[in-house]
Image (cartoon, rainbow, N blue to C red):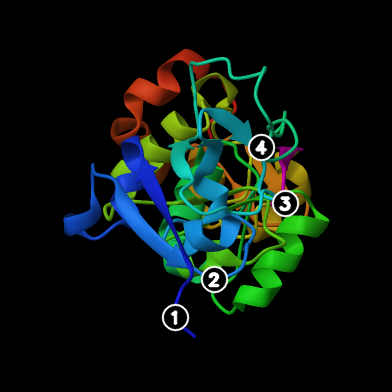
Amino acid sequence: MNPEYTAEFCFHEELNDFLPPSQRQRVSSYQFSGHPGIKDPIEVFGVPHTEVELIVVNGQSVGFDYQLQNEDHVAIYPIFVSVDISPVVKLREKPLSNPRFIIDVNLGTLAKHMRLLGFDCLYSNDYQDAEVANIAVTEQRIVLTRDRRLLYAKQIVYGYWVRAVKVTNQVDEVLRRFELHNAIQPFTRCLVCNGVLSAVAKADILERLEPKTRRYYEEFYQCSTCQRIYWDGSHMENMRQRYGGLLAPHQTDESRQR
């Protein structure tokens, strides 16, 4: 059946990252039949719904349940960081006040670095897409992924497609996107399992320490989940050098290394 209707779509700012070069920064026509919910054509263009904050149709803000009409003029905007859009139609509940993440299999190194900065990040190298989506919904976690198709899952409310390839750039991107710089709590989570670290007496773990560690270090921390032991060693100094600008305002005596 030939399409009956045509609408015009224009995607703004970083939403153009998802479009082929020929469609970026321009108005594109969309042909359709019936009256689909507007979320469907948005994702036909390749833009995950989790990346969209505001939809304006013919000058009026609408929700994802809006049914597309013939000759509609649709403007799609990304997440706003510094602009108050409270008077317009909300596409989802208010942002999570205490961001927690679930990170897909392509971003394992990012998970480790985000944990280093103190953020709650679930990660497993054998997560399936359906499992990631279910955990995100059940535990109200933000999905971080390099696979934009994962963000098409209807049940995912909060998600972000990480553009950068290098892990240090990925960290900067996520911190900026979710305004997390003031939430950094370095060296408070296990880099391996995401558990919370707490101080432990040296005498209680003495038999688990290598001779040089036992000799040169006095303060230790232990993961509440996997029981790994951390102390302030050379590896953590390397991390300080890498993230010096981020860690400096939050530096405490809780700097730890396994």
Q: Is 58 inside the magenta-drawn segment?
A: no
What residue sits 56% from the left and 65% below the top?
152
Q: Nearer the viewer, residue 61 or 199?
A: 61
Q: Secondary structure at mark 1?
A: loop
Q: Secondary structure at mark 3?
A: helix
Which amino acid type is marked by label 1? Answer: Asn
What residue sits 80% from the left and 53% below the top?
139
| Pointer 2 or 3: first along the chain | 2
| Pointer 4 or 2: first along the chain | 2
| Pointer 3 or 1: first along the chain | 1
Q: Position of residue 160 (x, y in %)?
A: 50, 49
Q: Dot 2 corresponds to which residue?
A: 33
Q: Position of residue 122 (x, y in %)?
A: 64, 57
Q: Nearer the viewer, mark 4 or mark 3?
A: 4
Is there a contact, CB below 8 Å, between mark 2 and mark 3? no
Majority secondary structure of the magenta segment?
A: strand
Instruction: Calculate the distance from the C-alpha at mark 1 to the C-alpha at mark 4.
Output: 45 Å
Residue bounds of the magenta highlight: 195-199
Q: Which mark is residue 2?
A: 1
Q: Position of residue 243 (x, y in %)?
A: 35, 32
Which amino acid type is marked by label 4? Answer: Pro
